Structure formats: structure tokens, C-alpha cells
Image: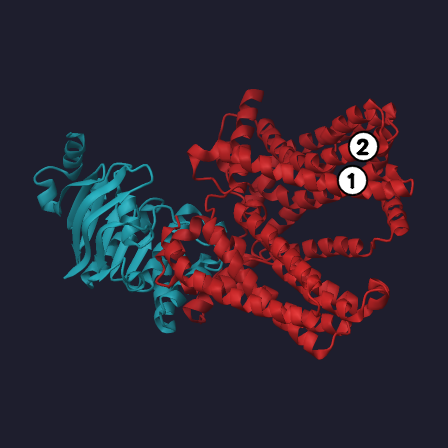
Amino acid sequence: MNMLSIKNFSKSYKNDKKAVENLNLEVMKGDIFGFIGHNGAGKTTTIRAIAGVLDFEEGEITIDNISIKKDPVSCKKRTAYIPDNPDLYEHLTGIGYLNFIGDIYEVNRSDRETLIKQYGDAFELTVNLGDTISSYSHGMKQKLAIIAALIHRPKLLVLDEPFVGLDPKAAHTLKTIMLQLCEEGSAIFFSTHVLEVAEKLCNKIAIIKNGKLISHGTTEEVKGNSSLEEVFMELIEEK
Amino acid sequence: MMKKVMRLVRVQLWAVLGEMLSIGTKRNKKPKAIYIGIGLFVLLMSAISFLYSYMIGSGLAMFDSLEVLPPMFMSITCIVLLITTIFKIKGTVFGFRDYDMVMSMPISTGGIVASRLIILYSINMLFVAMLMLPMTLAYGILARPSALFYVFSVIAILFLPLIPIVIASVIGTIIAYVASKFRRSNLLNIILTMGILSIFISMSFAIDDDGEKLVTMSRNLTSQVYSLYPLAKLYTMAVVDQDLFAFVLFIAISAIAFFLYTILIKMVFKKLNTAILTGKTRADFKMGRIKTGSPLKALYLKELKRYFASTIYVTNTAFGIVMLTLAAISLFFVDTQTLFGPEIPANLRSGIGPSIISFCVMMCCTTMSSISMEGKNLWILKSLPVEPRIIYLAKILVNLTILAPALIDAVILGIALKADFLVILLMVLIAAACSVFVSFYGLIINLLLPNFNWTNEAIVVKQSASSMVTVFSSIGIVIIQFTLMMLMPNILVAYLGYVTVLVVLDVCLYWVILHYGKRRFFELI
């Protein structure tokens, strides 16, 4: 079943240069979809548009068959988004932020308490939840953003470079949770520069270059008999 | 070395000025917009300062006391400088956002300290020049002193901000350092600031405009300042009497004090910045029962916490309501007939109440910077499954919460002014309608002129295009309202009309927020 659909999506900025051009993608339930490209290829632009953070004029993006342009609130209820640099409310405590997210997504008390405890312990952040976010390191903020994204059980997780700043144990925990969520029927769409992670974790991959999709399909289809790194290097060096 | 420092100053000063004018993202338009913006602002402030000093000077000259003008302006400048600099220290010299990046550059700590102090001095100098140069000109026209007066004045102005910067820095550093040691220090910080500002305002309330009293007051103020701040006396001797010894001494004391302060800061710069930038942690949290609430409540509480987490935000926006409360309570204990004079009719006296309320409420607008305050956190709001109107409502409710005492103040003020029941009722209605108006109006202006790329929240709150437009236009609205009121034959009808206009405007602005605000929310980046 289709969880995310991107049709003819294009986005230009004020200088008229197209950051993304005519992008078409589909993410199904249970997919872990890796979105790969060089710096400035259009990954973050696409991800921000899916999350409803960036306005766009051309194309259509639907989440669980609901248009993000027509009904952004319903789409966002089903989605969790983590940007590449999680700037959170520094004046709030960790628990204050999680509770804020819980209230916004209307997560009931018992689910909220259980999930905060479960993910807080998994990322070894529970003891720090009483401290203000301003005292957190980059990695701790990233962990908190991940926990906040998970406590409302999203159907679609949209992550921009989720492994940056995480220690090896937390990165492993995140990978385990990602697999578990997809087994339960959610879908994950994430960008990464760590090709080994994408190769091992994703069942589908898309490669974007200068705003255009140059390859996509199942991981096996995209990489064939080579490694993902070799394929990626070949594709981006081609004219 | 000096080249590197000046390069650093240039980059950071442009960043500060760019933020002030909310043009941080429009790189290609930056220099022109900055020049025009600064030019207009400096011109306007200088013109106001000139007119003000010329008027006061003329008044003083009538009582043969013109020589009081320069020290009076110098004292006021120093006091304002002192208060504003205390809150600039954190963010300029200590605890500034790009500390890590700047410290990793191949520039000595001394060089970095120098760059930060030059920035602090430059920002303050702009203000000092805007106030003191027009006063010098006004005094020159009125007193016709020798050419030496202008030479001494201009040189003295360059050294004038140094000592206030040193004193403010010491106080500001202590506050910032102590604050870094406590978890909930902001409230204490806010109360202290409000206390200090209230004292200054109460002192200015005590001045009335009776000519002879103004001179006595000015002289008293000057002599008090002389005893508290001996440098002011040196300044007077140097500028007014053109005493060369006093002039040299004034320059030398200012320069040496600043030099010693620079050395001291250089010694503690790294240590204090580390202490301030390293938050207080406990790492002892245990999961307990948590409270749940509606999305609106969550957004409202988040907004309220954001508000009280920033001393500069609170002191700049809640001051109107503190002033109103102080005025209401003070008038309760003062005989209004003595205060306004017997020649002012009773109905007009009670009619002043709504204008006081209007002015104080209009000066209390948190929404004019609440969108910009989201800064780098904007992505959170934009990715939440909440309608923009709920987000706006939370921001508006914070403003209305801060303004809630205005309703009680209106009743107290009404009783103090011996107004009849209908006028008191109108005053309460004006307080309510005005609160709603300023909350809506500030929000719309901020939606039109947002700035998310700030590095220092003081710039968003105090000097951004959005806050300047809101504050100045609000003052304009109050002036127009007061003038129209005075032209009306019946004060009661006039205020009834005012309430009606406000309510109609509130409805119109709400419509704008619902329609334009929704569209604008998606455009914000």
C-alpha cells in the first residue's frame, strides 16, 4: 500500500534555478527508502516539502493518499520529520519538549509515558530529560528529536541525515527501531551520505543528482552486482 | 593582527546591523538597504534629539541656567547607556552564539576580546552620537560658545561611552555569571530589571513641567549625578568652561579605565564564557506521571515559557503594563486636582485615563516579535499537525495574559481619577479592545516582516524592522487618537466612538490573520 507518493515535483528558488526537477517517487508501507545524492542535489528540499515545511507550486505530494497541499494537517498527523540539524526549543527541558509533542499529536497519557520511557531508555537519555535542552550536546538533541518523532507512532518517518551526531550505540538502536517500525507497517524515507548504512538497511534506494532522479528501485536493482558506493560514484560522475 | 581583528569586527557588525533591519537573507540587497535604513533612523533620531534639546535649552536659558544642558544630556545618555549595555553584555562579550567558531580562529584571545569590545562600543557610539551631537549643536546655537567648545565636545563624545560600558559590563557580567549557576535565574533577572527600570520611570514622573521647578530639578539632578558620577562634573568643566585640565583628565580617566577593563576581560574571557555557555545539568530525571493537555494549551505554555526565558523580551514588552500599574497605583494616592491643576475641567481629567491606558497597552506587544523569535525552531511549528490559526492564537493569548492586569488597572485608574461609572466601564472596554488590537496588529506586522536568521534575540525584540514599525506606528495611533479625542465636544461620546472603532478594527485584523496569516504561514522560511 502506498504511503508516500511524489508526482512531478519541482521546486525553484528565487534565482529561478531548479533545486528539484520533475521528481517522481513512491514509498510503500514497510519500505525503508534511502534517498542519496551529493551536497546540494535536492535531498533536503524534497524532504522539507514532504514534511510540509517548504511550500511548493509544481507537482503533487500525497501521504497515505492525502495531499500535503490540500490537507497539510492530516498529512502531518501521520508523519514525523527530523531535519539534518535538530534545533529544538532550548528553553524547554527534554521532558517538556516530549510532552509538548505528545499534546500536539494528542498521544494519550499511558502511551506517552510508556513510549517516552521505552525510547528514553533505549537511547540512554531518560536521566537527562529533566535538564534544559540548551545544556544538551548535538547528539543528545538528535536523540531527543528521534524520541519525539517516535512517541506518536507515525505512519511515515521522514529523516534528513538521521545518523549524524549519534554515537555508534545510538546509531545501532535507531537502525533496530527503523526495522521494527517497518515490520509494524510504517514507512521510512531518509537521506544519508553513509552508503554502507543505506545498502544494509534500505530495501529501496533513489539517487538524485542536480535535482533530477537518476536511478531508483529496490536496493538490488540499483546496485546490481557492484557495491552501492561504486554505483553511486559511477552515476554522479556521468554527464 | 589588527587587520584580522578589524575584519572580524566588520563581519560581525554587518551581521548585527543586517539583523536590525531584518534583511539577513537578502544578501545582494544588503549594503544598500543597510545604508538607507541606518541613514533614515539616524536622521530621525537626531532630529528628535535636536528639537528636544533645543526646547529644553531655550527653557533653561530663560532662567539663566543653560549651562545645565550639556551635563543633563550627558547624565541621561550615560544612564540609558548603562541600562541598555547591562543587557547587551550577554550576547556581545559573553555567551555570544558564534563563540566556538570565533575562538577556533587563528586570532589571539586579546584580539577577539578587542573585536567584541569594538562592536559594543560602535553600537553604543551610534546612540551617543545621535543624542549628544544634536545637543551640542543646540547648545552652540543658544550659548554661542567659542570654537574650542565644539572641539572639546566632539572629542569628549568619543570617550563618553567608555566608563558606562565598563560599569555596565561589570554588572552585566556578574548577572550573566550568577545566572549560569542557577536553573531558574531568569525570573530573578526579570524582576531586578523591572525594578531598576520602574525606579527610573518613577523618578521621571516626579518631574513636572513648571519652569522654575524644571530648573531646580535639573540642578538637583545634575548635583546628584555629580556626586554619584564625578566624571560628569569633569565633563561639564571640560565642555562648558573649556577647562583644558578637566578635559585631559576626563579623556585620560575614561581611556585608562577602559584599557584596564580590556586587560581584565582578556584574563577572564575564556573562563567566564565557558561557565556561561555550559548549561547547568542534573542528569537525575526519573519518569513519573505526566500531565496532558490540548494542542492549544501546549502551544500557549510553550510560548509563555519562551517569553519568560528571555529577560530582554520581558523587559522590553511588559514594561508598558508595569508602567500602567505603577501609574494607576500612584494616582490612587495622589490628589489629581493638585497634579493636573485646578484649571483642567473634571471631565477632561477623568478623560485622560483612557489615553493613558491606550498608550501603556500599545507599548506592550509580545506578538510583534513572536514569529521572528521562532528563529531556527520554525521547522518545528511548520511540521506540526496544527492549523496556523491555533499557533497564532497561542501567541496572541500570551500577549493577552501579559496585558490582563490592564483591566484591573483601568478600574483603579478610573476610581483614582474620580471618573463616573460609565467612564470606568469605557476604560475597561478600551483596555480590552486595545489589548486585542495590539496583539493582532503586532502579529500581522511580524508576519509581514519576519526575521529568522538572528543570532542575538535583543535585536529581534528591540531593533528589528517588525518591532520598530509596530512600536512607532502604535505611538502614532495613540497620538492621533488623543488629538481626535481633544477635538471632540463630548469626552464620553469620543471614547464610545474610540471603543467602537477599536472593536471594528479588531474584527478586521482577525479576518486578516485568518486569511492572510494562513497563506503567509506556508511562505515563511
Q: Quadrant of residue A178?
A: bottom left
Query: Which residue position holds label 1?
Result: B54
Image colour assigned to chain B: red
Q: Residue at x 54, y 61 (%)?
A: B439
Whole-percent x, y for residue B248 in the image: 82, 24
Residue density around tag 1, few if under 14, some if 14–19, many if 20 or more, within 10 Å:
many
Q: Position of residue B294 (x, y in %)?
A: 42, 71
**Picture residue at 39% right of the left edge, 62% below the top:** A101
Figure check: B468 above or below B413:
above
Q: Which residue is mark 2?
A: B141
- Say which chain tag 2 marks: B
Where in the figure is residue B224, as x and y percent of width and height? Answer: 86, 45
Tell me, yes or no, if residue B453 can be seen here. Answer: yes
Which SS class for mark 2? Answer: helix
Q: Quadrant of the N terminus of chain B?
A: top right
Drawn colour of chain A?
cyan
